[in-house]
Image (cartoon, rainbow, N blue to C red):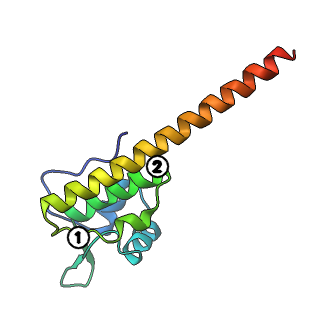
Amino acid sequence: MNTFIIPDDQKNFSTKDVQTITGMTKDALRYYERLNLLGPIARNANNYRQYSKQNLERLQMVQIFRRLGLDLARLANTDVHDSPQKKIAELQDYQQTVSQEITRLTDMQNFLAQKIAYFQTLE
């Protein structure tokens, strides 16, 4: 699954930069911020948001969760300062959730194939 690319040559990103990089709207960014999914967002001297690479990495996770139909609330309790062990545990938990979703979708696909095969016998 492809997601957006975070530029290596930049440390801070304006809202307009983030919109261009992610394809997300300003409203979506504010919504994810209100849900506490992005972590702390710094402000410059003019009080404009200055997103970090960590904020963009979290937006990548939001994008992945949305594509998979997973509950975004699971991302709300993560912290950019968490230990690598905690991050690994969280990612493994997400991976398990994705595996369960794959199983559910495979079962649904098999069910639909059976129904199609059944109705084809009636033709």
Give me the residue at 19% from left, 67% from top. 80
Label 1 sits on what residue type? Answer: Asp
Tell me: 34 left or right of 47. right
Q: Nearer the viewer, mark 2 or mark 1?
A: 1
Q: Please identify the quarter of the rendering in which residue 48 is found.
A: bottom left
Residue 7, percent from left and from top: 19, 51
* Quarter placement of the N terminus: top left
What x and y, as percent, mark residue 95?
A: 34, 47
Horizontal arrangement in the rendering, residue 62 relative to residue 54 (left or right): right
Name the N-terminal-most of marks 2 and 1: 2
- Which residue bears the numbered disc 2? 67
Q: Nearer the viewer, residue 13 or 93?
A: 93
> Residue 52, image x and y in percent?
20, 66
Q: Give me the C-alpha separation between circle 2 and circle 1.
A: 22 Å
User: Mark 2 near mark 1, Cβ–Cβ under 8 Å?
Assistant: no
> Residue 72 versus residue 9: which sits nearer the camera?
72
Q: Would you say 85 lies left or right of 93 here?
A: left
Question: Which residue, given by chain and number where applicable, does mark 1 sit on?
Answer: 79
Q: Crowding at label 1, few (<14), some or many (≥20) Cα neighbours within 10 Å?
A: some
**Residue displayed at 31% across by 71% down:** 77
Place of residue 42 in the rendered image (x, y in percent of width and height, measured from the top left): 21, 77
Task: Look at the numbered disc 1 and give the secondary structure of its residue.
Answer: loop
- Residue beneath the point at 54% across and 41% down: 104
Q: Is residue 57 left or right of residue 100?
A: left
Identify the residue shown where x is 61% and y is 29%.
Answer: 110
User: Which element carries disc 2, helix, strand or loop?
Assistant: helix
User: Which class describes the residues within 10 Å of circle 2: few (<14), some (14-19), or many (20+)?
Assistant: few
